[in-house]
Image (cartoon, coloured by chain):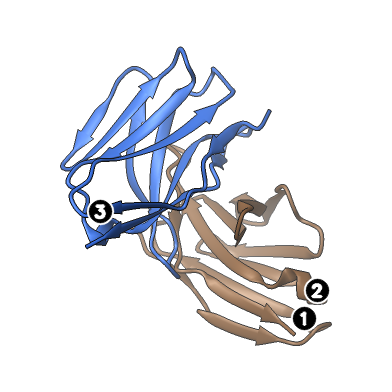
Chain colours: A blue, B brown
């Protein structure tokens, strides 16, 4: 079983929809989780992070963690065309320095 | 703001050429990373460095080497480029005292013909 699994999509939604992006992980020792956003032909940028103990909201974005299911989610409310990007989940990897990334979900928000 | 810059956005090289990709960060980060990103395969770690002159192999080091002579600069070297090294190459840096969040450069799209 891979450490981090993420549905690659693509996911296409109409503008204004609520989007749910998800990752599952296998290592119960992971303590915090990150979401990166990557626009086409750009490098990933950190969108938000959350600890395993709770949820976090930042504007239209909410990150949730379900430790019992080893499942994390990123919700986007009132999605906008500018949200069209690939979203990658990430969590601390095996070594002291590394992050383990999901493969990313490509999202398109259609006006 | 952390800034990570990469020497080229687009690069075209011939098979067998030696290729240098350079990365510079301006936040005094100890850790630096080189990834390649391919459709369907996600980000794959090639090498990382946690200090000057220190390096560790990642998941796919074959065909690559790295150099870190100064803290702010991390170079990726393709000793003899091959067509299967055509990819997007991303450099990142992080601080070990933070949440290990990595800051990425804009990427170099390398095509080997």
| Residue A110 image offset from top left, x and y in percent | 27, 60
* Mark linked to residue A14: 3
Q: Which SS class for mark 1? A: loop
Asked whether disc 2 touches disc 1, contact meaning CB atoms under 8 Å apart, the reply is yes
According to the picture, the residue beneath numbered tag 1 turns out to be: B18
Mark 1 Cα-neighbour bin, 10 Å: few <14, some 14–19, many ≥20: few
According to the picture, the residue beneath numbered tag 2 turns out to be: B79
Chain of the residue under the numbered disc 2 shown in the image: B
Asked whether disc 1 touches disc 3, contact meaning CB atoms under 8 Å apart, the reply is no
Q: Is residue A75 above or below residue B91?
A: above
Report which quarter residue A71 is drawn in: top left
Q: Which residue is drawn at 60% across and 83% down?
A: B11
- Between marks 2 and 1, how big is the CA–CA gap? 5 Å
Q: Is residue A110 shown left or right of residue B80?
A: left
| Residue A94 image offset from top left, x and y in percent | 63, 31
| Residue A79 image offset from top left, x and y in percent | 22, 50
Residue nearest the observer in this picture, A28 or A86: A86
Q: Which residue is drawn at 50% across and 79% down?
A: B9
Residue nearest the observer in this picture, A29 or A2: A2
């Amino acid at each position: 079983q891979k450490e981090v699994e993420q549905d690659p999509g693509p996911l296409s939604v109409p503008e204004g929809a609520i989007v749910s992006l998800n990752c599952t992980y296998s290592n119960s020792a992971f303590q915090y989780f990150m979401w990166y956003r990557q626009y086409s032909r750009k490098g990933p940028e950190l969108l938000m992070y959350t600890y395993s103990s709770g949820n976090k909201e930042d504007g239209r974005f909410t990150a949730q963690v379900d430790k019992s299911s080893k499942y994390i989610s990123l919700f986007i409310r009132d999605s906008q065309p500018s949200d069209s990007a690939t979203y990658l989940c990430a969590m601390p990897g095996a070594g002291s320095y590394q992050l383990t990334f999901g493969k990313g979900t490509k999202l398109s928000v259609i006006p | 703001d952390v800034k990570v810059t990469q020497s080229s956005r687009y690069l075209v090289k011939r098979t067998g050429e030696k290729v240098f990709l350079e990365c510079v960060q301006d936040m005094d980060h100890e850790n630096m990373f080189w990834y390649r990103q391919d459709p369907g395969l996600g980000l794959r770690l090639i090498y990382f460095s946690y200090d000057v002159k220190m390096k560790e192999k990642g998941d796919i080091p074959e065909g690559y080497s790295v150099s870190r002579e100064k803290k702010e600069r991390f170079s990726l070297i393709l000793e003899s480029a091959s067509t299967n090294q055509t990819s997007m190459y991303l450099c990142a840096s992080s601080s070990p005292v933070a949440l290990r969040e990595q800051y990425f450069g804009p990427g170099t799209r390398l095509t080997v013909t």
